[in-house]
Amino acid sequence: MNKYFLLILAIFGFSFQAFTKDGYDIKVKFTDASDSLVYLCHYYGKHTTVFKDDSAHLSSNGEARFKSDKKIIGGIYMLLFADKSMSMELMLQNGDNFSMEVAKANIYKTAKFNGATENIDFYDYQLYLVDYGKAFQKLESDLSNAKTKADTTLLRDRMKVKGKELSDYRRAYIAKKPNNFLSKIFNAVEEPEIPTELPTLPNGKKDSSYPRIFYKTHYWDKFDLHDDRLIYSPLYERKLDDYMSKLVVPVPDSVIKECDSLLKVTDGHQEMFKYTLWYLTRWTETSKVMGLDEAFVYLVENYYMRGKATWVDSTQLAKYIERAGKIAPNMIGKPAMDMRMLDTTAKNIIPLSSVKAKYTVVIFWSPTCGHCQKEMPQFDSLYHAVLKKYDVKIYAVEADNETEKWKKFINEHNLGEGWIHVHDPNRTTNFRSFYDVYSTPTMFLLDENKIIRGKRIDHKNLPGLIEWLEKKKSDNNTKK
């Protein structure tokens, strides 16, 4: 009897799971709003942008219904009034069916939910945060007005205790309901706790680098990179920003390694992988750190060109490939593409490879470019003050075929010693493509073997780069 009962229970249990409805059914009632269009939106990786999923019109008594049979990912969604007068966050999971009543004028204190929904817990937490925030702001205000060192110490200790209170609230909830999505959210915002005791190095000193290494190593421990619902929240991009900008060493090899690591973990989880690759692509392409465009090229060649970005259409894919193709020939560490340019007389050809110098600065500029008009004289002053002693030559390419204005500018500003002025009036060298010259001035630093050692630099940071290269050479020679 018991055996058959368990069998029937198992069958029905399976059936209930198998036939759970996709989508959502949400009944809302605003006690102080009516005749308004309201959107159901979702976040996507960050808090500054939301996407519309559905809309409903509040009736004369403030009621509306959002209903869909289409499967959703779930996450933190939002009710947004069309006039943007109010927004209200909701936790929404696939298959949710609940109702709610709320006053637009005081969301946190009036929100009431009926049905199986985590929003009951979510809004208990929101209400807790309102009181918590007021208490913490009071401590911050008292700290800024503290008159004595003792008061400052006391208030800082109180702030630490208050901070622990919030952490304890979240951890208690996780312990009680570990499988809830709200627990995933709480884990996602948890910071690694760095041990207060530093390990001792073999030389007997304390390892001061340990806190940073520990923090980086455990940064992603509680953020579930396998759960696509966390993309539909405002958390992930901030987390990525802090990690890539503050914890990853900003050199191509390190960045590429971290990109591969994140993409490997998220692979197989469509939205998480998609957002991660999109973010890393944008971050490496637009980085102001010299040389990180190498990581962008790596991502294009190893992910986009190998068919791993299945959501990208052919037009966007072609743009990525084209951009990577323009960057690849002029990455740091690559041999500079030779150019055979004419001098100011248009009679003599001066190849870039013929320049004999310890360092060669290649500048693409135009006499009609406002920035160039300021930069070129400053560069000349820098040459005489600093660069000359390092055996630097300036291979200056006129980029816009302004021949007469070019010659006039050179003469008026006496750009003579150290300068090699060339141009390509017949456009035979394809320099814009090889050196990715889309604006002026564009500058590269080459070593004595014409290997690219710096790119997109200006007169301010060039001396520091040369000094660093010189020190690196000296250190290498000492090791030998």
Image (cartoon, rainbow, N blue to C red):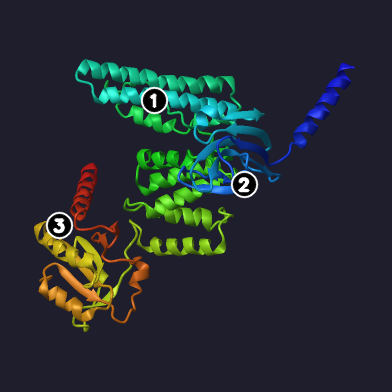
Kind of residue sitting beneath label 2: His
Q: Nearer the viewer, mark 3 or mark 1?
A: 1
In-image side of 42 versus 162 (left or right):
right
Of 136 and 422, the residue lying toward us: 136
Q: Is residue 93 visible?
A: no
**Residue 262 location in percent, x, y?**
49, 42
- Badge 2 density bin: few <14, some 14–19, many ≥20, Cα 10 Å: some
Asked if 108 appears above or below 234 in the picture, the reply is: above
**Residue 457 location in percent, x, y?**
26, 57
Identify the secondary structure beneath mark 1: helix
Kind of residue sitting beneath label 3: Tyr
- Tell me, yes or no, whether the two marked residues, 3 and 2, touch with CB atoms within 8 Å: no
**Residue 139 location in percent, x, y?**
32, 22
Of 211 and 135, the residue lying toward us: 135
Of 214 and 119, the residue lying toward us: 119
Kind of residue sitting beneath label 1: Lys
Q: CA distance from mark 3 to mark 1?
A: 60 Å
- Residue located beneath label 3 in the image: 390
- Residue located beneath label 2 in the image: 57
Which badge, 3 or 2, is on the more N-terminal residue? 2
Q: Nearer the viewer, mark 3 or mark 2?
A: 2
Identify the secondary structure beneath mark 3: helix
In-image side of 373 versus 209 (left or right):
left
Q: CA distance from mark 3 to mark 2?
A: 72 Å
- Residue located beneath label 1 in the image: 134
Identify the secondary structure beneath mark 2: strand
- Badge 3 density bin: few <14, some 14–19, many ≥20, Cα 10 Å: some
